[in-house]
Every structure is written in C-alpha cells, then in structure tokens.
Amino acid sequence: MALSVLAAMLLTAAMLVEQFAGASLRTAFWPAFWAAALLLFAAMADRRWGRTMLAVQAGLTVVLSPVLVSAEPSELDPMRRPDAAVGLALACAAVQFVAVVLAYLPPSTAYIRTTGRRELSPTMRKGVLVVHVTSSVAWLGIITVQGSLGITAVTTDDAGLARAMFTAMLVIDATFLGPAAFCALFTGIMLAAGTRWGLLRRWWVATKFATMLVLMVLPILAWQDVPVDGLALVEAGRPLAEVRATLGATPYLAMVSPALALFAVILSITKPWGLTPLGRRHRRPHHRTTAVPEPRRSSA
C-alpha cells in the first residue's frame, strides 16, 4: 500500500511540474486520474479485488507508457514535457510495478487470505455499478461519434469541413474519451473481481473483460493516428483525394469499436455460456475428513 501511495505522489508531482512549466490544463487530467485510481486501489489492497485492480492498472501503465510518459509535443499541446516530469512519471511506473510484485508474494497473499474481506460492500457495489453503467454508455456514444467524424472527414469534398472533423476527433480523444473508457474498464473489473461473478469464473465476464481490453488497445495500435495524419495533410493543403488515399480504409475500421462495445453490453444483459474451468473448480465442494470423537468413558 505504501508503495502505491508513493507512486501516486510521484505522478502528482509530475503533473505539477508540467503545470508550473506552462502546460495546458488538459494535460493535468491523466496524472490526476491515474493518481486517484492508484490511491483508491491502494486503500483496497487488503482485498483480493483491490490487489487485482492494482495489477490491471500496472499492466495498463506499461501498455500506455509511450503515451503517458512521452516528452514529444502533440497537436493540441505543442509544449515539450519537462525532463523532470518525464523522470517522475517513469519513477511512478517503476514503483507501481514493484508494488504489484510485492502484493503477490507470499507475505501479502497470506495476509489477504486471512482478512476475509473479498467482496465490495453493498453500498460500494451500488455506487460502482452506477459509475460503470454511466461511463459505459458515455464510452459507447463517444466512440460512435469518433467513427462518424472520421468517416465524414474522408468522404467530404469540403476541406474546411474535413479540417473541422479531424480537429473535433483530436479534442474528443484528448478530453472525453479517456475518462469514459478507463472509468468503464476499472469499474467493470471492480464489479467482477469484487462480487460473486469473479473476473475469470464465468465465460461472459472473461469475454467481456477481454473485449474491453481490446477496445482500449485497438485504437492505439490501429487508428489513433487517423485524425493526426488527416489534419496534418489537410492543413498542408493536400487534395482531399490524396488524404483519402493516404488514410485508406482505416477510418472505416474505427466503427469496429462501437460494435465491440455493443457486444459487451449484450454480454452484460444475456450472461451466456456458464462457468469456466476455473469457475467449476471454485464451485466444487471441498471434501474434508472429520474425526469421529471417541465416546467418553464412564468414571464409574
């Protein structure tokens, strides 16, 4: 827990360094959100689901580190990140990784096993459910809008409209997409790991978890550069035909994200497929041999 708190402090310090250096206020969101999540999961680290959340966030930190730690300026934030902020962010990632490793070593495992606090409290479960449903609906709407803007940008014959569409995609991505996506992901994992459903005990939960991870990673690998490259080409005065030829079919593939998100919603409603092998082993009763007490001997 102490190391996770230290990681949150390092990330907050990185954010403050950026702000004092004159960065846009928009850049403060990710460090603030990540630090708040770290503090919440650290406070719940004595629960199995809390430890699971720390591990998931650490894994995402590794996956997203090129974006979270990059010093290169972006189209919406032209200032280069200070070296001190980059160093603090890297230190945060390292400390977070060490904290997760220690959380899964025998001393911590034995302690968590003895606490008996494995699930969310009823009040906390209701609150997390509200946030999960709200953020999931917002996420579905945002990625649908993003895909629609991208398709409009590459099909229009108006250069001004294309520039506006690409700019709107960048603003939405930097401002709204992240909060909705990570709130939906984190709260979904909390509801699974912190309730009787389990994260890997039922096929529909495990499939939804995998789908949400794909939804997080796929835009980074596939079409995150679409608005960046499209806006650069339009502002350079290139013909829209060249813009379409350069981007190819990638903007249309962005509509895969809403389809995957809708699939995750259907899984939540229908709950198909039953137990995984892990779930069946967990449900299997444990047969224990109980010693038969010897009859008391009469004192007579």
Image (cartoon, rainbow, N blue to C red):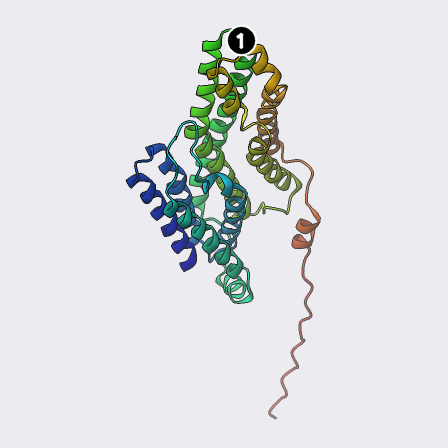
> In this figure, which residue is indicated by the disc labeled 1?
156
Q: Position of residue 266 (x, y in %)?
A: 61, 29
Q: Please, is residue 20 above or below residue 243 in the view?
A: below
Q: Residue furthest bottom?
A: 300
Question: Is 57 displayed left or right of 293 in the figure?
Answer: left
Q: Position of residue 41 (x, y in %)?
A: 44, 50
* Quarter of the rendering occupied by the N terminus: bottom left
Label 1 is placed on what type of residue? Thr
Question: Is 223 displayed left or right of 282 in the figure?
Answer: left
Q: Residue furthest right?
A: 277
Q: Position of residue 65 (x, y in %)?
A: 50, 43
Q: Please, is residue 120 above or below residue 250 in the view?
A: below
Q: Please, is residue 15 above or below residue 92 in the view?
A: above
Q: Please, is residue 290 above or below residue 20 in the view?
A: below
Question: Is 200 displayed left or right of 7 in the figure?
Answer: right
Q: Secondary structure at mark 1?
A: loop
Q: Is 76 or 1 nearer to us in this picture?
A: 76
Indicate the quadrant where residue 28 lies.
top left
